[in-house]
Amino acid sequence: MTTSQKQAAQAQDAGTAIALTNCAKTFADGTRALMPFDLSITAGETLVLLGPSGCGKTTILRMIAGLEFPDAGGAIHFGEDDVTRHSIEQRRVGMVFQSYALFPNMTVAENVAYGLKVQKVGKAERDQRVREMLEMMHIDMLADRRVDQLSGGQRQRVALARAIAPRPRVLLLDEPLTALDAKLRVRLRTEINALLRKLGITAIYVTHDQEEAMALGDRIVVMQKGEIAQIGTPQEIYRAPKTPFVADFVGASNCLKVDIENGRALLGRVDVDVSRAWNANPATDGLSEIYFRADGLMLCAPHDAHFTATVEAVSYLGEKLRVTVAGIGNDAVIVDTDPDSVVRLGETVHCRLVPEKLTMFAAN
Amino acid sequence: MSMDLDLKEGRSRPSLLSSFLTPRAAAASPAILTVLLIPGLVIVAAFFLIPLARVAVEVGNGPEGWGTYLLILTNARYLESLIQTLAMSAGVTMMALVLCAIVGLFLVRNRFAGRSILIGTLTLPLSFPGTVVGFMVIMLAGRQGVIGGLTDAAFGAKLVFAYDIAGLFIGYLYFSIPRVILAVMASAEKLDLQLEEAARSLGASRFRVICDVILPGLMPGLISSGAICFATAMGAFGTAFTLATDIDVLPMVIYTEFTRNANIPVAAALSIVLGLITWACLAAVRSFTGEGKSLPVRGGA
């Protein structure tokens, strides 16, 4: 890191805490986009809003930005400031969009300088700050380029530099990597992560990609149909999903419908002890759904097996072999195994559940 | 049955002509392409180049010879007419751009009952010849016009402005609006709302957003439709003719010199000057908006 980059990092405002209280959103046509919710984001935290399209995650982001306003009764605070009725111009937020939204009639440097110019920062200071931002994003050599001469990754770097340059109180990122190809997405994700930590800025990041959410979030908010399904650290969300939706949405999940009796799942000919499932509750006997990821089931020797199943598909993923098997429950089930093992299509395999890695919910 | 057979044979053995007419064959052979171009070239020559050359030559045949061009630029009446026409066209263009930018943006951004009918009505003048537009201006602001009737009833004096510069201006504006509004709406549809949100997030006021984001986004549409508007106004004749206005616009002067005074060299020289100015305007716009971006077809009024 050069001296100017260090200065840039130090000069950045310390993060601002954000609190949304009793916020709901009903659109003009009567659609209820968000049910009333509370959400606090601590200063400097990176919070990821994760969910399928139409779940309300972008509406929350736009509410924090000041592009949407909560229904009567809702309140939004930036630190001590009540910004509920402030428009976006007054909130000092930095925004990064999926479509980059760079000004096509300006050069890279002019784009980055725009927020400072609007705030009437003097030319010398502005130029200095733009230089720092461009250096920090490793795009200083592109300063005089037109926006349409840049690649997608370069554009998003410019968009980040532009958003950060005026020292916003919060950085809002709306699916910023979705338009990029897979490899670049991972690289830029790592860079954004490092940048957010370095700046210590409060950031809210919207995505539908659970891997991105896990990689970036201090905490993840999983959204479902206008409601918060779960808030937690990536580990909590992944290992201890609180609803079937979270279990299913975060990570490739398998689901079996089973009858539970006295802590044992009755699976056709066998019954499996599920009392060690992390959320096992002796009271929840009856028809249940057991969720588990590819590591919640393992291929094993015939005498240890809970099931036999038929191999339907095999994908070699480098670090593991992903096997899709049929014959356990109604749907096909995914199981990961040693990448060097030999598994053939149509072959009969033996599997057993790993009770510690199961999540159980009462079936509807 | 026999017809069926014929058809099948026809399909399996394509005629020589059909093989010539397939796009692939045409693309493959420059010779065929040239042959196909002949009708177009003939029309360009017969109805465009030949009359144009003839008009240009007529100037030289007059008593002043090629000096006629100098004459029209030094003769007070012709020069005044040229300046008036330029000023009128520029004024109408500016006014049309301002009005249509606001209305076009509003129409694209808002949905309300009767919106499509309103858009249809705004484009209606495209279907009227200039004469009808002039007639309508007289009905509005002429001696027997609506405005005159109202002001007469209210103040005892008729307000009549159909026959002076205001009437001409309104007429020109009326037939210019559809050309500009359609182009503005096409540009406005393509404006990226997120650009405006990005500017606002950086603290830009509504006014700055208009200056820094919306206007630059609309600019290609404004420039090209402004050029069309200007060119159409430069050449408009029917409206001025119907209004029998006391403003001598250039097309009217050409008409008078040609039909009444039989001053063919001057009429020809004025025609060439009018054409050159309009052409230069369109060419300048083409270079402004970038070569290859096509301009909408010019319609007469």
Image (cartoon, grey):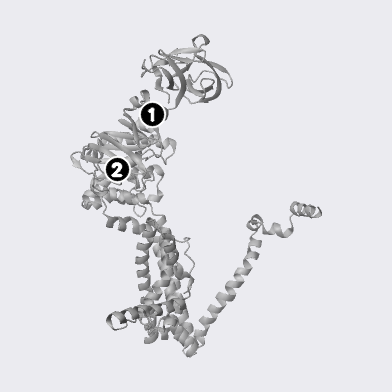
Q: Nearer the viewer, residue B228 or A22?
A: A22
Q: Mark 2 packing: few (<14 Cα in 10 Å), some, or many (20+)?
A: many
Marks 1 and 2, how far apart in space?
Answer: 24 Å
Answer with left or right where residue B11 lies relative to residue B263.
Answer: right
* Chain of the residue where label 2 is placed in the rendered structure: A
Q: Earlier in the sequence, mark 1 or mark 2?
A: 2
Q: Position of residue A211 (x, y in %)?
A: 39, 31
Q: Position of residue A337 (x, y in %)?
A: 48, 19
* Secondary element type, mark 1: helix
Q: At 28% across and 39% down in the image, what residue appears?
A: A23
Q: Residue furthest front?
A: B153
Q: Is residue A103 left or right of residue A92?
A: right
Sort mark 1 into few (<14), some (14-19) or many (20+) by Cα contacts within 10 Å: many
Residue A64 is drawn in which quadrant?
top left
Q: Residue furthest top?
A: A303
Percent across and percent down for residue B239 are 43, 78
Query: In the rendering, at what x and y percent does residue A357 appear?
Result: 40, 19
Q: Nearer the viewer, residue B219 or A204?
A: A204
Q: Is residue B58 above or below residue B4?
A: below
Per the image, the residue denoted by label 2 is A63
Residue ranking furthest to the right: B2
Q: Is residue B286 left or right of residue A199?
A: right
Residue identified by numbered label 1: A246
Q: Mark 2 belongs to which amino acid?
A: Met
- Same chain for the residues under marks 1 and 2 in the image: yes
To which chain does the residue with label 1 belong? A
